Image (tube, helix red, strand yellow):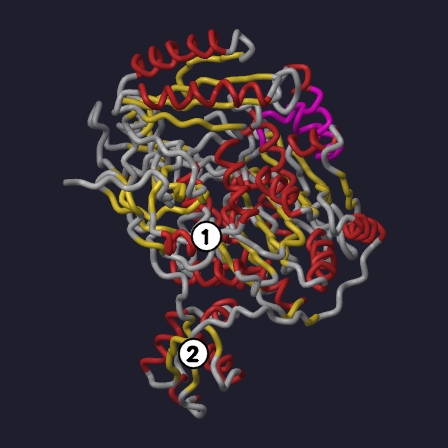
Amino acid sequence: MQVSAPASSPIYRVRVAVPVYLYDCFDYSLSAEQYQQAQLGARVAVSFGRQNLVGMIVEKLAPDAPIDPKIKLKAISELLDDAAILDAKVLSLLTWAAQYYQFPIGEVIQSALPTLLRQGKPYNLLARTWKLLDAHAEDKLKRSERQQEAYKILKLHPIGTSENILNLAGIETATLKALANKQICECVLEAQDFSPMSITMAQMPLTANPDQKKAIDTVLKAQKKYQAFLLDGLTGSGKTEVYLQIMQEVLKRGKQVLVLVPEIGLTPQTISRFQSRFHCNIALLHSGLTDSKRLQAWQATQTGKASIILGTRSAILTPMPNLGLIILDEEHDLSFKQQEGFRYHARDIALYRAHLEQCPVILGSATPSIDSYALVQNGKMTSLELNQRAGLALMPKIHVLDLKIAQKQHGISQVLLDEIKKRLDKKEQVLVFLNRRGYAPVLICDSCAWQAKCPHCDANFTVHRTPYQHLHCHHCGTVHRMPDHCPQCANTELKPIGMGTAKVEENLNEMFPNYEVIRVDRDSTSRVGSWQKIYDKIQKSEPAILLGTQMLAKGHHFPYVTLVAILDIDSGLLSVDFRATERTAQLVVQVSGRAGRGERKGDVYLQTLRPDHPLLNTLVQEDYRQFAKQTLKERRAALLPPFRPFRYAALIRCESKDQNLNTDFLQQHAQFLRQSSENTIDIWGPIPAPMERKAGRYQSHMVLLSTDRARLHFFIRHWWQNMLHQKPSSMKLSLDIDPQELS
């Protein structure tokens, strides 16, 4: 006979956010003892359907809270943490982000955790400490410079030093392992010390000019409250010095500083600037770290041991108990927007986080986004301008070369070639910018005009010559061998047309055989440590030609570059995306800003087929701020974001193997939304995406616009979840709130 439990016996429950694509959290039961121990923001192992998952406790339900008798509660499998690993502020930040970007809370919490914690690994990982065994091993290391370097640093720390510190000093783990094989040092696992380190100055600050001083003082007045600042400084005007002097005051108060940079490539030079100024614990958070290093850095941040946290966009979601300042460097950069899965924008989350923490946030850029200028106009952000270059450096002069009339050699005008020669003879460096990697963007048949197109995308193959000759699609990654004849007419004369960085490199080597050409793109920097080697080469004052893609345009300091050449700007001026001209202008100004940063004056040469383009003329004759004012006017007239009446946008991307299926599905649901929102939401589309076919699947887009953000979000919420339930299994849908790209 089954005895039912007395009605009064309490049922202990917690609400768990589980990493599945569902918008709800789920209740699980636990014992009284576990309930006592369970903390909000701690991990639990749970069974979900047929899976065992790692979830996060987001609520403890009162034992006497009513329960639906129909619900069959599962018990948690295990409590994984004794204490909370996500504090209350971070939980509320993640909850807000999940609601705002309409993404499942369980998945959002997952993205805020390092991989090892997602997998349910224990929190208390041991730190790797390297100790010296042989203090007289100089003779064993004659051949390897790196090992000699590592050995010198180990000798400075006779009692041992952590792997993280060695990595920050530029010593790779592989080098340490090579020394261990020679019995020169050993790796010991020790419990980590998370006590904060006292901060001392390693170097005195520079004297600030009046603009810098005004910016520093304004921010420091708002140290203990929320205020957003836009640091709008010319390229080379000393934004980093402003950051460093503000950081100094914040760190003195025992607070943490979070610095976000758009790309991993910018972290080595930024970290060396911080290290040369402050003696304190610096944590690095980016995707290029191994899982254990990422966890160690995350723990140092979460415990308050790290005083400066330097990272890419995901670092904004990391717990920091004493956060006192957030800096977003190069805030205009598109890399701050996540482009798949949880599509958040680090800038917007940074503003909300600063508001939660009641601390200032600085967005810095030489070319602020139009959205940031709009926030300044609406009084939501304070503008701080830096109008003079640091030291004696002057702004470079921009020259426009009309490609229609210019004499050319290998697609580069003769005037530009003469200028390059002049600079190299003077022992200066030249930067040649082309935003297209590979050898050539098109392979065409001379006799019947056949083109090598990707079979899966509406795009041409790009010709690559390294490491071997092949065709590569930059959209879906398909690789084909190079054809030896035309498949249409069997002609053997196949011609690569257009220029990629590899072809320009070949041409420049031919025209300037006595000088080194250093290529910087995704292909040449894919190996570990390759970017650092290239960067060290550039910092030597030897004449060279730097050739690269966007990677070179971002925030780097090249003191010996006096000439910048931009080979092709037209594709950005003639795009379908309304933000394309803004991006192009930012690119021109950012690339131009690499010239003349030292004592020598810089020049910029721009090749174009459209010298009469109004945007180019505003940029060349006036400056980026004028261009921004003009763009703001145009967007306001066209009712485009960031302006009312159409201020808030959401983009639905739909992909399947059949375009008609996409269109019918989106049209049907657009009709539902029109009815439920009583036509208060403007719906554009559905239309095919600018690249209709990608990786063998058809893409379709639909844009939702509204003057009222709260209403837009309210109506989208149920409609979107309903859409996800009803979609065919072969279809992929994604929702992008505040999209930055319409492609």
439 versus 238 height, above or below: above
Q: Could you classify mark 2 by the number of other residues whose Cα lies within 10 Å: few (under 14), some (14-19), or many (20 or more)?
A: many
Q: Amino acid at mark 2?
A: Trp
| Residue 597 percent coordinates (x, y) | 69, 54
Q: Could you tell me residue 70's position as x and y percent?
A: 29, 29
Q: Label 1 amino acid? A: Gln
Q: What percent of the width, then of the height, locates residue 449?
A: 32, 22
Say which residue appears at 29% left-offset and 46% top-offset: 75
Q: Which residue is mark 1?
A: 39
Query: Residue at (78%, 43%) from the top-left corner?
Result: 385
Q: Residue furthest left?
A: 1
Q: Quadrant of residue 723?
A: top left
Q: Is residue 447 visible?
A: no
Query: Residue 628 colored magenta?
Result: yes
Mark 2 or 1: in front is 1
Q: Main secondary structure of the magenta part?
A: helix
Q: Residues within 10 Å of mark 1 (few under 14, many from 20)?
A: many
Residue located beneath label 2 in the image: 130
Q: Tell me: 67 left or right of 602.
A: left
Name the element at disc 1. Answer: loop
Q: Residue 576, position in %: x, y?
A: 51, 21
Residue at image point 46% right, 71% down: 192
Residue 424 located within the stretch drawn in magenta: no
Q: CA distance from mark 2 to mark 1?
A: 35 Å
Region rendered in magenta: 608-633
Between residues 256 and 22, which one lies in front from this camera angle? 22
Q: Quadrant of the C terminus?
A: top left
